[in-house]
Amino acid sequence: MITGDHKITARTIAKNIGIFKDGDIAIDGVELEKMSDEELENTVEKISVYARSFSRT
């Protein structure tokens, strides 16, 4: 799930609709920006919520 919502709000919604399971990760845009390509590649399958994410135009 990709959303502009706060990470806690997004994770709660994702849990309620069944897309956030035990062991999943929620990250926000700042955390994503700080990740190297290798870090992202190693965790992308565990990330089910991308919060505070906005498109760049």
Image: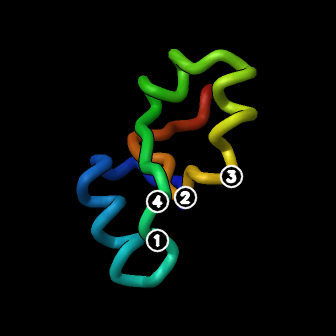
| Residue at the spot of label 2 | 48
Q: Amino acid at mark 1?
A: Lys
Q: Earlier in the sequence, mark 4 or mark 2?
A: 4
Q: Quadrant of the C terminus?
A: top right
Q: Residue at x 34, y 59 (%)?
A: 10
Comparing marks 2 and 1, which lies closer to the viewer?
A: 1
Q: Is residue 2 left or right of residue 57?
A: left
Q: How is the image coloured?
A: rainbow
| Residue at the spot of label 4 | 23
Q: Is residue 18 left or right of residue 55?
A: left
Q: Residues within 10 Å of mark 4 (few under 14, many from 20)?
A: few
> SS for tag 2?
strand
Seen in the picture, residue 45 relative to 53 is either above or below; the reply is: below
Q: Which mark is residue 45?
A: 3
> SS for tag 3?
loop
Q: Residue at x 46, y 31 (%)?
A: 29
Q: Nearer the viewer, residue 2 or 21?
A: 21
Q: CA distance from mark 3 to mark 1?
A: 12 Å
Q: Earlier in the sequence, mark 4 or mark 3?
A: 4
Residue 57 in view of the camera: no
Q: Amino acid at mark 4?
A: Gly
> SS for tag 1?
loop
Q: CA distance from mark 4 to mark 3?
A: 11 Å
Q: Residue at x 63, y 40 (%)?
A: 43
Q: CA distance from mark 2 to mark 1?
A: 8 Å
- Percent across and percent down for residue 20 are 46, 69
Q: Which mark is residue 21?
A: 1
Q: Are marks 1 and 4 in contact (CB under 8 Å)?
A: yes
